[in-house]
Image (spheres, helix red, strand yellow):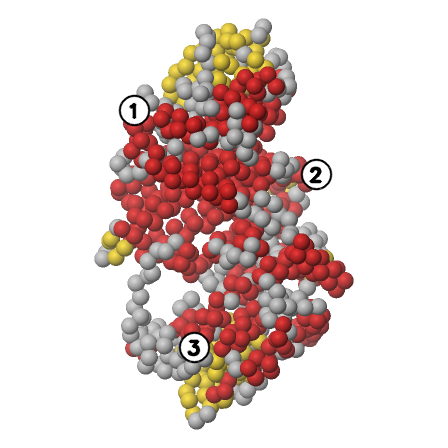
Amino acid sequence: MDFNDSQQEAAFRKEARDFLEVNAEKRSIISDKPNDKSPQIAVAGAPETVKGGKEAAQEALERAKVWQKKKAEAGFAAILWPKEFGGYGGSPIQQVIYSQEEHDYLVPSGYFEIGIGMLGPTMMVWGKDEDKKRYLPKMITGEEIWCQLFSEPSAGSDLAGIKMKAEKDGDEWVLNGQKVWTSGAHFADYGMIVARSDPSALKHKGLTYFYLDMKTPGIEVRPIKQISGTSNFNEVFFNDVRIPDSQRLGGEGEGWKVALTTLMNERLAVGDPPGLDFDQIFEATKELEVEDGLAIKNSEVRQKMADWYVQSRGLQYTKFRSITALSKGQTPGPELSISKLVTASKMQDVSAYALELMDSSGMVHHDQNPVLKNLFQNGYFFSAAMRIAGGTDEVLRNIIAERVLGLPQDERADKKVPFNELPSGKN
Amino acid sequence: MNFDFSDDQKLLRDQARKFLFDKCDRKSLRTILDDDRLHYHKELWSQISEMGWTGTAIPEEYGGLGLGMLELCVIAEELGRSLAPTPFSSSIYLFAEFIKNYGSEDQKKKFLPLIASGEKIGTFALSETNGTPKPSNVKTEYSSEKINGYKSPVIDGETADYLIIAANSDNKGNRNSLSLYIIDLHQDGVSKTSLETIDPTRPACSIKFENVKAELLGEQGMAWDMTENIFNRAAVLYSFEQVGGAQVSLDEAKKYSMERFAFGRQIGSFQALKHKMADMYVKIELARSNAYYGAWALSTDSNELPVAAAGARVSASDAFNYAAKENIQIHGGVGFTWDYDCHLFYRRSKLLSLNIGSTRQWKENLISNLEKRNIV
């Protein structure tokens, strides 16, 4: 057992580190950078929260695009992609190494991950050659940003319950309906969408997959204000949106199969969320006073801290096990399926407990305190979203139970009935 | 990065698993459980000793196989899976490690070959009263070359030939008054009283010492430091036993939930049970990964060991305690009968998590070691 890089890995790490040292700024455990205040919902591909209204958001977007271009020129923007589309043609272990290194730096995140991680790979499998040539290189450089239009008000955990209508009209399709929880729809140039082309077919059989220009007439994007007060997601309304049949990916009725390509890549796109973990609350307990002195000297506090430490490091070492498999050129086992389930709840528990330790001052945001800042107040809200975005805790437990442990699937009412005959709620 | 066991180590694991599956079945385990006079599975003990498991991490010059601590971790996990009723942990993780790390050359020559061959069994005892052991509640004394006092509980005490204890070597009653002594238990003045443990497949007794001969182990006044270090080393090995036991608890819960039908379907198809088993899986994977890190620290003599060992121990205790109790829950009524095996794991999980200090105590160790590391 060792934690050493192989020679090639070490060389690649140096390449990544050299690039980052010159082009980015290091992150500290608890940073005093204004844009590093919020723990990120990296799983949802949501960009960092930006305060200061539309102008500031636009500036942040421009900064992100400048950064992405640099990263693409250095070859690190799409390490797993083949060279012909502007990728690095690298291996999963190289992707891991780059992510590890980048994690220590303050760089824009949340704008390009969904495109490069999920939608690009879908187009590589299902797109026509001219589509790939036209769209993929600009996805990497950040010149064009993509969003994923899957979830709907009545299709969340049960994603195949999509109701968005796709009706064929000659060489065109007409889309009507609503999408929701679309990260980045307000700045995306293009999107990929699943819609129901045949409501009389079985649920998973009547779907078709398209890509589209977000400026197509009839598309309206409305931001959703979250409990954190920020808006990372949108509702997107489609009103007689006409798109050519040439923008279809996969066959008519094959949409679910194409969507699975996208979703299978979701796990690979999941980054290491920076932000709120054992290290942060450990620092805080050295500052905060409770009834009998510093929090870190209190026995109850210490017992709780130990639990979070073993969760946090346990996840880190679980990642090391997966990385070891990648490094040997093998497919990692299912162990990393526990990652978000553990991380999200831990963040929520850590945040809530840190507020407890602050006592009544936990009620207010601490912009002025260099150690505490808003970290735990923000984490308290973000973690609630994190337990839902990218698969709820409950869905993740089902996945572990069924796909990892091999337990029987739930009895389902929707398997053999045409979609338009399924019972549904008021949505 | 190579954060995994080697192919040879995995081969050893497969062989050990197969061997224990054949030779340490539930029936033989229950023989020990049901008979108060039996303290361990003698036949199994001599077989695993013959195969050299007892000498895995003991150098060849002292009669061992001279393999490393990683191999011992592999064997520990298998012993944990099979709930092997042997004094392996006491004799190998504790006694042998004390001698190996702190014994004089003469002591190593004298004791290690006997332990490696399984011919003799050793154990260790610290505790004398209820609650967390601390220097001030060690009353046993060494003076005029004799030990007088009392230790309880002494795990595997009735089986053991040798015992290492902490005793006061001066009257100051603090941490630096305590030294370690090796006692040959076959002598006048040693009296043992059987105790009933929560897991009778891992027995214990109390031992009274009246003018008993003993020899000093390691430096005088260093008992506490030496014990902390050996407990750290042993904690990693115990955590592998616990991960092994936790995994089998999950496997058996899963198997039962797929065979048992209620409301016209497999009970394993109900989300309430699936989610419980998913939670077991999460805790086990976290524990396994923490144990791996402990194994790495142990095998490389890293100064990370105190933190890594405590992390492994806390995580593994949590995983096994949870898996064992929820295994009973998933079995329903039959889960708390003597006939079903759930209680074997429930017993063992709690016993293992108390054996070298409670989870509470290890959590405290973890945080205090993290504080120390930050200062350094």
Label of residue B35 in the image:
1
Tags 2 and 3 both on a single chain: no
Query: Farthest residue toward the left?
Result: B264
| Residue type, label 1 | Asp
Q: Residue at x 63, y 72 (%)?
A: A83
Residue A414 x %, y %: 31, 70
Residue B123 x %, y %: 48, 22
Q: Earlier in the sequence, mark 1 or mark 2?
A: 1
Residue receiving disc 3? A255
Question: Helix, strand, or loop for circle 3?
Answer: helix
Q: CA distance from mark 1 to mark 2?
A: 52 Å
| Residue type, label 3 | Gly
| Residue type, label 2 | Ile
Disc 3 packing (10 Å; few <14; some 14–19; many ≥20): many
Side of B374 where A217 appears, left or right:
left
Which image quadrant: the N terminus of chain A? top right
Label of residue B375 in the image:
2
Identify the chain of the residue marked 2, using the numbered disc in the image: B
**Can residue A120 be seen in this snapshot?**
yes
Q: Residue at x 42, y 38 (%)?
A: B16
